[in-house]
Image: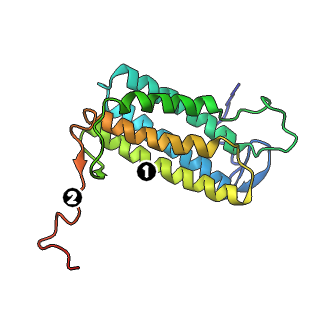
Amino acid sequence: MVFLSRITTKTGDQGDTGLGDGTRVPKDDPRVTAYGTVDELNSVLGLLLASCPDLDPAIAGELLRIQNDLFDVGADLCMPPDEKEEPGTRLRVTPEQTKALEDAMDRDQEKQKPLRSFILPGGTPASAWCHLARTVCRRAERDVVTLARDEKVGSEVVVYLNRLSDYLFVLARRLNGHGEHDVLWVPGGQRSSPPSS
């Protein structure tokens, strides 16, 4: 249960913050950077939902579930794993959460034409927001990989973020009429003359 009686605590005025286990670390600590980027991703998804009120309710429901998942990811990252930690005693990202993304992708990809070019972020506003979320997700994944090089990270966090960026790509195509309105990359297509070999 979360209970916040005050938002301003002044405990971070010297540039440090508390992790879930009470440890104080600098606000630019790699762990804080990682869950901060996850929080940024969640905010982009919030903007997608708020900016596109006509979204299919099924898609809106999926995105709301993912926003909740991302709070779980943040909680997982905020609490460094302990070697003596008993399974189920801490909130950790689960394989079932990743599987839900995979199932959603499988359903959507059945309706999409195979890609024959890279896609430029854009098309419909909803798709453009989705592409922005995808790129922030990739940055969150990179931040977690950097963190995991030196510190312990929940075993499913990187897997979930990797799958989520794939899901957001597939969803961006769904929001472009299952790819019908995708804007395709034309290599060198904007140059006045072809590149020399």
Residue 116 rendering spot, x and y as whole percentages: 27, 49
Is the residue under label 1 in contact with that under label 2 (CB below 8 Å)?
no
- The quadrant where residue 53 appears: top left
- The quadrant where residue 38 appears: top right
Depth check: 33 or 192 in front?
Answer: 192
In the rendered image, which quarter contains the N terminus? top right
Residue 27 visible, this orientation: no
Picture residue at 68% right of the left edge, 40% below the top: 76
Residue 134 visible, this orientation: yes
In the rendered image, which quarter contains the C terminus? bottom left
The dot on residue 186 is 2
SS for callout 2: loop
Picture residue at 45% right of the left edge, 42% below the top: 166
Residue 57 rendering spot, x and y as whole percentages: 37, 20
SS for callout 1: helix
Depth check: 149 or 60 in front?
Answer: 149
Q: Which residue is mark 1?
A: 135
User: In the rendered picture of this protein, how many numbered marks are placed on residues?
Assistant: 2
